[in-house]
Amino acid sequence: MNIIIYDLMQDHRNIARLLVYMGESVQWIKEGNSEAHILLLRNCVEYLKTYPEEIHHPKENAIFDQLGIRDGVSKSMVDRLLVEHQYLARKTKSLCEVVNAIECDQIVSHQKLVEVCADYVEHQFRHMRDEEDTVFPLIEQKLTVTDWKSIIRVMPAGEDPLFSKERKKYYDSLYSEISNSYQYHKAR
Ligand SMILES: [Fe+2]
Ligand SMILES: [Fe+2]
């Protein structure tokens, strides 16, 4: 497998772990509204705003654009996924607004938080599945060495601040919560 596609799929696995954890943390907030859980939810949203939105999707955009150039038949699929990236960015913004409102003690029903979060998680999962089932295999099949050289010239770089070895201190507690939750589910 191409190393860049491998890395994107690894990002998907990590984002999936975060989304599962986020869904759980919202349930805890619904039940107890603890400040600690709200802070962890804030950390989740900050991560989604930075790494997936600023690095993962722009990387994919560079690759998808090149696939559209190389293979006219893939163009409509590529365009749909590029539009979805913009749609997901708006969804992340809406989620962030709900979390901001909770932090500012504005009245947000727990039901609303659960709904916004569930909708967000579902869209992200569907998007990642779609990429892996449709466009990633085509990328491996169609792109040439010259295509990859062009992609690398424009593709953004940046370490994952939560799941890489270079984890930022800000994310230490979120990372350990996600790991504990993962271990817990594995043991059941
Ligand atoms: Fe994507
Ligand atoms: Fe992706």
Image (cartoon, rainbow, N blue to C red):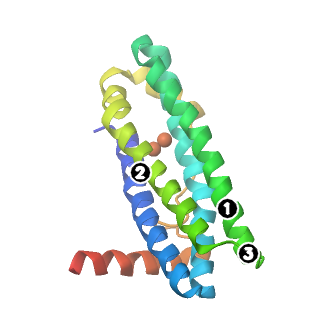
In the image, is the residue at mark 1 within 8 Å of ligand 1 by its beta carbon? no
> Which comes before the other along the chain, label 3 or label 2?
3
> Which comes before the other along the chain, label 1 or label 3?
1
User: Picture coordinates of residue 3 (x, y %)?
Assistant: 36, 42
Residue name at image x 44 percent, y 43 percent: 127
> Which comes before the other along the chain, label 1 or label 2?
1
Q: Amino acid at mark 3?
A: Ile
User: Picture coordinates of residue 173 (x, y %)?
Assistant: 53, 81
Residues tagged 1 and 2 counted as in contact (Cβ below 8 A): no
Front residue of this view, candidates 3 and 174:
174
Residues tagged 3 and 2 counted as in contact (Cβ below 8 A): no
Residue name at image x 67 percent, y 55 percent: 94
Q: Amino acid at mark 1?
A: Cys
- Report which residue position mark 3 lands on: 107
- Report which residue position mark 1 lands on: 96
State the CA–CA distance, disc 1 to disc 2: 18 Å
State the CA–CA distance, disc 1 to disc 3: 15 Å
- On the picture, is 52 further left or further right than 7? right
- Report which residue position mark 2 lands on: 125
